[in-house]
Amino acid sequence: MDKPWKTFYPKNIPYEIEIPSLSLYDLLDCSAERHPNQKAVIDGDQELTYCELKSASDRFAASLYEKGFRKGDRIALMLPNCVEYIISFYAIHRLGGVVVQVNPMYQSSELDYLLRDSEATWFIGHSEQQKKLEKIGISNQLIIIVADRDKQQEDGLYEWIAKGTNRLPDLDINPEKDLALLQYTGGTTGRSKGVMLTHFNITSNVHQDKVYTADPLQLQEAGERLLGLSPLFHVFGMARMNSAIYTASTYITIEKFEIDKVVDLIRKHRPTIFPGVPTMYISLLNHPDLTADDLSCFKYCSCGSAPLPVEIINQFKVKFDVPIFEGFGMSETSPTTHRNPVIGKRKVGSIGLPYPNTDAKIVDMETGTIEMPPGQAGELVVKGPQIMKGYWRKPEETTLALRDGWLYTGDIATMDEDGYFFIVGRKKEMIIASGFNIYPVEVEEVIYQHKGIAEVCVYGVPDSYSGESVKATIVKKKGAQVTEQEIIEWCTGQLAKYKIPRVVEFKDQLPKSTVGKILKRVLVEEEIERRKAMVGGK
């Protein structure tokens, strides 16, 4: 089938580009050479120029090398957003090591699985993480480097940096072949898998993003300030950090998203680029003191990690006069494959068009071999230089996900006549009630339009008659008075009868992953357990 988006591709953005073959370390090295005195990182009272960041990374790499770290070694990086993460990340890649991304909120059982699965032999984290390692009895199998901010700590990160020399091996990295990252999937639908990403997977996506976004907006090299609040241990946050380094921008971050501190950070540093996740935009939208003037510094806002409801996008634009450009990506795609154009036609609610050098199509959900016509739902499959190498030591899962160069995303989507793509839902989240397919996002969009709703999650629960029925779990806006019957009546007339929630539940908050993705499986499991308890109590 023809690729209709080529006709609607924004002017002056080439559909096919030449992508340089770069390692992740090259991103830092080139920016430090071109702009040594440009501020690279702001992390509270810690600020580093590009020259200082490169020097710290090189010296840490030298100490790692002296202690026996070699190309291909896997090192677990268990840090929140901080300058220590950034120094460590580029030091590891200077030596051709493999970063194993670890969520610092993981507890012992989660950490045990990830460390054993990745077979990491090195570990960088805060001192508080050592107790978790001791609990699972794995600390004696690791070389542990404590990265606390205390620069006087014996044998800590800063001592390793201080003792580092200029003696480093030659840079020995084949970007297209060498593994750079094990990015473990969120585990929202099952056991987490290690996504293998090469240097070229990640740096090609950084370059694609620059050509598709930064260049059309005429963003300035060494002139922008990126607000890095998305977790660096997540592929979205990590990629945006690399984009900042590639363009010699200033990366501004704090360890934890706290809305009042974030507002102060925006007012103080006036960031120009904000890649956020849904919960961040919802928090900004509901902040009582934030004004359009406060956000007038933003030149570009994007959303990642989870879909952002159209109603939130519209409210954000009305209140702050700031558009949010939606896109699509996964850990398996380094992460971005699609984004709404920043110039030309933008369709709110769409994930936009494929990035340069990226192909995409919609295929049938049964065989995955029949390409669906415009407007008809099917599974989204993608192909491009950013597509993962495979899943770490999981050949069967790799074979299922990668077929003839195409990545089968597991997402249900449609493509319209203009080549714009729309995510309808996840294959595993689709509700089947009395034979009808129901996409949760469609119901959620309707409920979000109710003025009393802050957040909503729609999912299927077991039903003895229809197989599954629709349930909505809702967080009300502060002070709002909303009832179950009111929500059902709100949906009536806007949705087919079989799509209207049979059950509406209200909660103070929804369970979420660390990047703001609502964990539907947790809500489903809670419902199943509740029903078991009811049966057992009879």
Image (spheres, grey):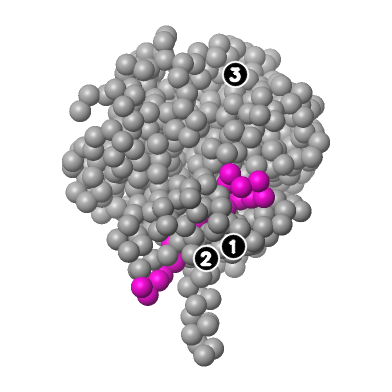
Residue 82, compared with residue 116, is above or below; it is above
Q: Is residue 285 left or right of residue 393?
A: right
The residue identified by callout 2 is 503
| Residue labelled with disc 3 | 248
What is the quadrant of residue 237 in the picture? top right
Q: What is the x, y in percent for residue 356? A: 37, 21
In the image, farthest residue toward the bottom: 538
- Tell me the amino acid under the disc marked 2: Val
> Quick one: 214 or 139, which is closer to the camera?
214
Of pointers 1 and 3, the one earlier in the residue sequence: 3
Residue 432 visible in the displayed image: yes
Q: Position of residue 28 (x, y in %)?
A: 55, 23
Extreme-front residue of the structure: 493
Residue 297 placement (x, y as % from top left): 70, 21
First to last magenta residue range: 448-465
The tag earlier along the polypeptide, 3 or 2, is 3
